[in-house]
Every structure is written in C-alpha cells, then in structure tokens.
Image: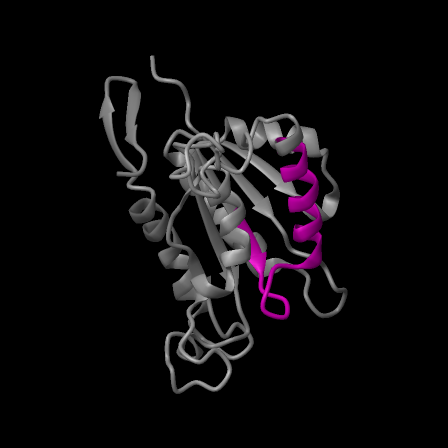
Amino acid sequence: MEETKKVLLIDAHLTYPNWTEGKLNNAFIQIAKDFFSAKGFEVLETEIEEGYDPEKEVEKHLEADIIILQMPVNWFGAPWIYKKYVDEVFNSGLHSQKFLSGDGRSPEDASKQYGTGGKMQGKGFMICATWNAPAASFNDPLQILFQGKGVDDLFLNITSNYKFCGVEIVPGYNCFDIFRSSQIPQDLENYPAHLEAVFNLKSSNVGNSNQYKVFK
C-alpha cells in the first residue's frame, strides 16, 4: 500500500487591523486544502502569525512532499515574519543537518558547486502570492519600476533557500492588482488547475486506492 503523500501549507500573512485581515490569503489556503485533501494528501499547516516551533517545522518540511508558501506581497517581498521564520527554521535544519550538509563545495572536488549540499531532493516548493502590483508591470522592459524583471526575479531570495536544500522550485501562482482588479474570483477558480498542472498530479481509481504521480 502506497504511503500517503503530504503537503505543507505555510501561511505568512501578517494582520494589520482595519487594513489587511487576510481573507484573500485564507481563501487560497482553503482552496489548496480542499484540492489536496480530495487528491488523498494529508495536509500539514503552519500559520506563522500564530506561532511555531522551529524544530517541529523542520520535521513538517521533512514529512512533506509538497511545500506551498501562501503570502501577501508587502513592499515587494514577504511579510517580515516570514524572514524570521526562515532564519529560525532553516538554521535549525542546518545545525541538525536534516536540511543540508554543508554548502555543496568540496576541497577534494572543485567541480562541486556552491548550493549543492541539500538533502531535500524529491520535494517541490511553490509560492502563491497576492499583489497590489498589476501583471502588466512585470516582464516588460518599458516598465519603469521592474524594467523587464519578472516575479521569479523578485522572489529569488525566497526560492533560493529551498533550492539550496535540494528542493525543486515549481512555477508559482499570482493574484495581481487585488485592490482594483475584478479578476479575483477567476484567480480563485483557476487555482486548482494550476496546482494540478505544476505538480503533475494525475489520479486514477484502482479499487479503493488512488495512485498519484507527483512532478514529472
């Protein structure tokens, strides 16, 4: 009998009363929970704002096949509580050598590159983000602010942590222009299709069990 797959959903929303209460991010979290539960996954959750134990977060990461960061973009990055979370959790994973062993380089083999010492191969990481910025401001060299850079460029500081530990980075999902756009209902509706596509999740019923293919 196949072992149950697990997904870790990390909620990095930071509440500012009477301004941002987290309802949209919560909606994306709920959609992901429903999607993965329907696929037979066990759902692990962390709501950073509610507190966490770094060592337990390390174990959640090790258990999970898929890790999804749900976040609002605050001043072109994740809320500050997420950086604190990363520093504490990844430091714990480094000291215990559960996430990685060294940085990949070896004095005996000069061909071994920096960033190849991770132990978390076979896992996938994805960001689902909500933005005030419109989609048109990215990937266009005529745009004054980002000058042709894309979302992946802005999130390199986040995805690099996971790639450094051997995790595969899969294409993220973005909900743009949230204070002006009328596309939010469509973005919510289209989210499950994105999850199915990027994680290559295909199910077929065989008796009372489901068989899943995760990634390519």
Classify the position of the N terminus by image quarter. top left
Q: Is residue 73 left or right of residue 121?
A: right
Q: Is residue 168 left or right of residue 84?
A: left
Residue 53 image point, x, y percent? 72, 33
Extreme residue toward the top, this view: 1
Classify the position of the C terminus by image quarter. top left
Q: Residue 168 falls in which quadrant of the image?
A: top left
Could you tell me which residue is drawn at 37 percent across and 54 percent down? 171
Could you tell me which residue is drawn at 66 percent across and 30 percent down? 95
Residue 158 image point, x, y percent? 54, 53
Residue 205 image point, x, y percent? 24, 26
Q: Is residue 24 left or right of residue 20?
A: left
Residue 94 versus residue 35 in the image, above or below: above
Q: Observer-nearest residue: 91 or 113?
A: 113
Q: Residue 148 falls in which quadrant of the image?
A: bottom left
Could you tell me which residue is drawn at 49 percent across and 40 percent down? 67
Magenta stretch encompasses residue 92:
yes
Count of marks, rendered view? 0
Residue 157 image point, x, y percent? 55, 56
Residue 181 versus residue 41 in the image, above or below: below
Q: Residue 185 falls in which quadrant of the image?
A: bottom left
Q: Observer-nearest residue: 8 or 92?
A: 92
Magenta stretch encompasses residue 23:
no
The span picked out in magenta is 69-93
Q: Is residue 73 left or right of residue 212?
A: right
Colour scheme:
one colour
